[in-house]
Image (cartoon, coloured by chain):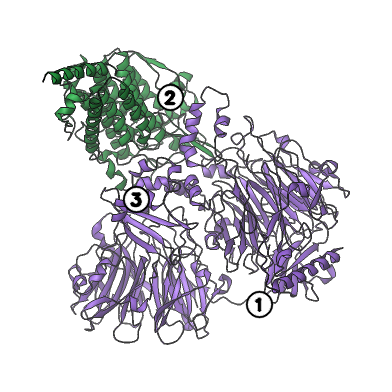
Chain colours: A green, B purple
Amino acid sequence: MKRCFLSLVCFFASWVNAQQKFSASDYVAALKSATDVMVSDVTSPVAASRYYAYINLAAYESAALFDTSYKSLSGTIHKFTPPVLEDQEKIGAEPGLTMMLVVYKMAQRMLPSGFVLKMKIDSVINLHKKSSLPESALMLSQSAADKIVKHVTAFAATDGFRQLNNRTRYTPKTGQAYWQPTPPVFMSPVEPHWNTIRTFLLDSAQQFKPPAPAKFNLAKGSSFFNQLTEVYNLGKKSTSEQRNIASFWDCNPFAVEQIGHVEFGLKKISPGGHWIGITGIAAINAGLTINEAALAHALTAIALADGFIACWDEKYRSNRVRPETVIQRAIDPSWKPLLQTPPFPEYVSGHSVASHTAAIILTRIFGEDFSFADDTEVEFGLPVRTFSSFRSAAAEAAISRLYGGIHFRDAITAGEWQGKQVGTLAEQRFSRYLIHFK
Amino acid sequence: MFKKYSIISFQMSAWLLMFFVCGQPVEAQPLFSQVQADSSGVTFQNRIIESAGVNIITYEYFYNGGGVGAGDFNNDGLVDLYFTGNMSPNKLYLNKGGFKFEDITRTAGVAGRVGWKTGVSVADVNGDGFLDIYVCYSGDLDSSQRANQLFINNGDLTFTDKAKQMGVADMGYSTHAAFFDMDRDGDLDLYVLNHNIKNLRNFDAAYVKKMTDPFAGDHLYQNNNGKFVNITQKAGIISNPLGYGLGLHVADINNDGWSDIYVSNDYVEEDYLYINNRNGTFTEKLKQSFGHLSNFSMGVDAADINNDGLLDIYTLDMLPEDNRRQKLLYAPDNYELYNNTLKNGFYHQLMRNMLQLNNGNGTFSEVGQVSGISNTDWSWAALFADFNHDGLKDLFVTNGYGRDMINRDFMKFYADERLKHIQGKTDNRMFQMLQGIKSTPLHNYIFQNEGDLKFRDRSYDWGFEELNFSHGAAYADLDNDGDLDLVMNSMNQAAGIYKNNHIELNGRGHYLKLNLRGTGKNTAAIGAVVTIFTTDQAITLQNYPVHGFQSAMQTPLHAGFSAAKIDSIAIRWPDGNYQVINKRIPADTLLVIVQDLKLNGKESTPKKTSPLFTKAAPKISYQHIEDKVNDFKLQPLMPNMLSFNGPRFAKGDVNGDKLEDVYVCGPKGQAGKLFVQNRDGTYIEKLQQDFASDAEAEDCDAVFVDADQDGDLDLYVVSGGYALDDEQMLQDRLYLNQGGKFVRKKELLPVELNSGSVVVALDFDGDGDQDLFTGSRCIPGSYPMAPSSMLLENDGKGKFKDVTTEKASLFGLLGMITDAIWINIDQSGPNELIVTGEWMSPLVFQYKEGRMQDVSSGFFKKSYAGWWNCLKASDLDQDGDMDLIAGNWGTNSPFKAGTGNPVKLYYGDFDGNGFVDPLIFHNIMGKLYPMASRDELTDQMVSLRQRFPTYDSYADATLTDILDSAQLKMALLLQAEVMETVWFENTPNGFVLHALPVEANFSPVHVIHVDDFNADGSPDILLFGNNEQARIKIGKMDASYGVLLTGDGKGNFQYVDQVKSGLQVTGAVRDLLVLPGQGGKKILMVGRNNDDPVFYQY
């Protein structure tokens, strides 16, 4: 009995010791390796938002299993039940290590090229093999992580994603008002049935239905024509700052370059990926613990995922044509937008929705006037931009789509509205979790 | 001099003939052997040096290579060689005999300028009897640096560039040029083929097509006494910025004695087929002539490959032969892009080589896949010539591209990774990135023409195993031994010179070389057409020097043939005069024929035999309007769509006036129509309210039967289709004839929702009333699963009961039925029901002991699983029993099959998402590989994205890599071993399969009609079909214009060419009716999908 007690003390000592090894930075780094896989795989913005949501959800649930001050998101998220661990695992597993393994293994399981993360997982495990962590703690951490991953991926498997490829693939509607595939490669539109994916918080994909877009009308003076002219003129004489803004928030996972037979895609993070990046910057700057970081990421990612479902629902309701298509047809056959038009309908602007949804959650977590330097796009050859608040960053992201020539103004306004609606709802539903950031 | 050579060569071949007769095998040495540069002295290399300033991104035709010019520049009887180097100096080599050459470039003064040199043309431009050299320039350079050069031969092996003074210093981005006499004025005019160096992909097509581009567009120059005048616009030559001209061939394509022009264009702009209007202008007639063409057309050649006197056209593209490169390089099907291209006014274009067989009536049948020459990878030069003297022109192809620019992994992963990796580290990121792209040299292809439109790949055994990047090429008899040697211009290695060993090896067959001497300035008689008649062959050659890619061969015409004796030679000279030589023509020699104006004659116009079928005025005014859906949006991995079924016809006398009336099945959205025949033979539509109510159903078949036994004909219509808005529309319909009004009686039919295909009226139980068999085709959204076919029993009053379970339980799992017939095969007892369909063998059922029993094994001794579309019974061999003709998919597709070598379809819900996954595997170079590209497969089964994260990881995948053992265990399998349309002879030992002529397999056959069309007392066969709704990679299957096969009454059938048959039916034919014509004539009504029917009289 005495020996047993002693070993337990030793065990706790090393456990505490090891736990300190993981910080918010480690969490952000792990998530970044998932982002890298998504970028390489050319994951669409909507699919990326879904992956981020489940990965961060699992990570946060892992925290909640070990630290009772954190409550499971079950009851808040539709149809979600908390993962269950054996007592042995709850006591013996190392929480920080478990959470890191959960992040990597979630990404490994869910992402098409997740297998490349095996190296990361091995190195985390090997590092701990060499540390003072007892073999049993390592084993229990692994089995705990596996259980959490299994539980959350099983939950993800029921959200309708696997049924998407059974749905009739999209055929562009006929009529000038409707979306047509866009140059240069006339890709099929991304995920036309995304509104069938189970929401996390929203009552339905249709809960925040934006007003109908301006009616297609090429008559001078009509709202549509005025907006068309605005995009066209901006494309002809935008300021260099406007162009910088457009490029910074491009977030196109796959812009195709064509030079004769040479054709290749230039990859960037998605809009959701960009805001996950910002969440990471804020988490580190604010000195969050790894558990707080996981929560901040989970709340932001889940809200973002619902934002995309709502946005995509509208996109394939209005099926609105892109500026590029109309301008080339009606005004100037040689006109090209500054940014490459993404392959899906125009209304509403996804970046406007995502940015405002994320900004509301982040503002609630980190405060109104949280200034930050955004270096997420540096690896894609873009500069650092600084912002005085999340809201100002979101506003800039939204208007960037007009500067980029890929959206009309009403798609931005309505997108901002929808993003704020989703964000506000999420903020309310998350109130019992947000107390951690008071 | 010429005689001397001929004697030598004749003796040689005689000696070898003896050698062969002795029975010695002579295959030890390949047909061709390479003559090394150190032996030949031809050290020319097309050196390409990539740099940050000049590379594939700065100039997209950087890897297109150089050309070869062959001609006897000093008139010593030996063919000399000229090579163009893109960046390196051109070279002229004087042939010294015995495969020894001397570089005389410097003294000749023909190295060309610094710049980007491309094609070469060889012709006696100024008509002084000495061959001149025209060199093309391109590249991302100043226009002055792109001026083409014309090296005029001074007669002493020195040359002077007179391009400017003669007006041919074209400053476009030139690929190639051809001299020919366009206006028959006796001198040579010039066509210059240009290309755009800018990437024009996203544009308003109508807008850009109307533009002209002085440098990218092609140019036509008329020779006015030695001065060339640009007449491009006036002559009707297209000169828009979309011209990416890569191939040029001038020849008399429509056989009217005037030179026509074929231009092949890269990318979206179609190729141009310019038909000479005989007045100094041309009319572009590509779309009227071809059903589809190569997408990224490169080199082109035209030759008479089947010795029918007509010039066939062959264009090259980029489709690799092997599975691995197909999976790595081929983009997935994009229907939006394809349809967008069509909507923009462009044409059906597919990435593979196309062999356009000339039908002689202005149409061509594309049969590259039947011939086996559709996949030769990224290909440049095509040369048709008879390399083995059997009278059939063989085919040589050069290929290879500097870097695999269209590798899907490069596009999706590698380019981005590498660009990020070198970001900021270098100023020339793109160049750095490019250098990481894989470079895959390829072997050249050489195909032996085996006759019957079949080409056999002999690349390895004829000596072309070497991997290289080869571009321009020429054939010429370099050693004057009588056979044609080959020369090619290769990138970064010595030019290839390949000696033809045919004469030395076995000497089978014979040859004749012809040196034609024209009148006036056209000294080499460019444009002459020669036909050499032997006892068993007629070899037609056209005398145009430009062949292959960026190359020209102004050399004697060469013909091989099997018989030793030439009966006659017919020559049509460039000026239209005609001459026949039929006395004492030696073989195995070189003949010089000078046009003798005194002997000029006119071509005896062959007596116009009137065709068997003549077009008739429409008897029934009808337009089939198909509901345009894309079935692949539901199931992307089907081979072809199942929604495009009609129109099918039914006929019967509905009003008892002894005249047959017609029902035309309506597609979804268009009601079926009843046309009643009047006394005068005309037809008038009788509107039927109940037909209109059922317009949303897709009628797939119909039959007139007296269901209720009240003495008039009622109508049973099969509903089917694939992409439906309302499943209820699959219910078949019975309309009772109530005094001419057809009234739908729902209560008389069982409720069923099977997507049907065929109905057959049959009194299976012999009780005197009409029972029905209905065949089912598919379950919408669940291909290849098939619903139950049905046996419907009539209660004698017109009420039909589904007795499938009790009396025909086997009909529940018949498969995807397409057709059925009720005939008496064994001439005893009751009839048999024969059914067939996709992925199955024909099955025979007999009604015995109260059940429909499968008696197939008694009639078909083995399985003949195919993609059968239709069946027809007829006594073809006139022995008193019924034989069968079965329409199949044909052999003009990528799906090659044979006994023991099936196309396979594994299906099941492999990813457990509740939907069937159909995975087709077919033979590519001897092994089964998946049909689907990586993106297509992972779209069907998302879980496979993890197994195949890259294109490379999928490039070698076979069945067991795609499905694990558990999935394989649950997989269901369908197979097809026979793709050919065939006839089955009814013998006491069952049906025996017989092949039909190759033309029967040009396209899927959907309609078969048998009659004695030529009134010789024996049954003939008429086949129609085509399929315009296959996957993009399979493409538009349109090579059939109606195939007439005449029979001899003994089961032998012969194809009747389209001129003689008179058939010229475009589109997808789905049914045919014979209507009464005037004066005992018959009228064929040929029903076309989404079009009006066409009518022929016979």
Question: Spatial distance from mark 2 to mark 1, Cα to Cα?
Answer: 74 Å
On residue B607, which mark appears? 1
The residue beneath circle 3 is: B963
What chain is tagged by disc 3? B
- Residue B157 point in image, percent of width and height: 86, 48
What chain is tagged by disc 1? B
Relative depth, front residue between B1097 and A389 = A389
Kindly identify the amino acid type of the residue bearing the numbered disc 2: Ala
The residue beneath circle 2 is: A246
Q: Point out the image quarter for the C terminus of chain A.
A: top left
Kindly identify the amino acid type of the residue bearing the numbered disc 1: Lys
Compared with residue B231, is residue B477 higher up or lower down, i.e. above or below?
Answer: below
Quadrant in which residue B314 is drawn: bottom right
What chain is tagged by disc 2? A
Q: Few, some or many C-alpha atoms within 10 Å of disc 3 (few <14, some 14-19, many ≥20)? A: some
Question: Spatial distance from mark 1 to mark 3, Cα to Cα?
Answer: 63 Å
- The answer as to whether the residues below labels 1 and 3 share one chain is yes
Q: Few, some or many C-alpha atoms within 10 Å of disc 1 (few <14, some 14-19, many ≥20)? A: few
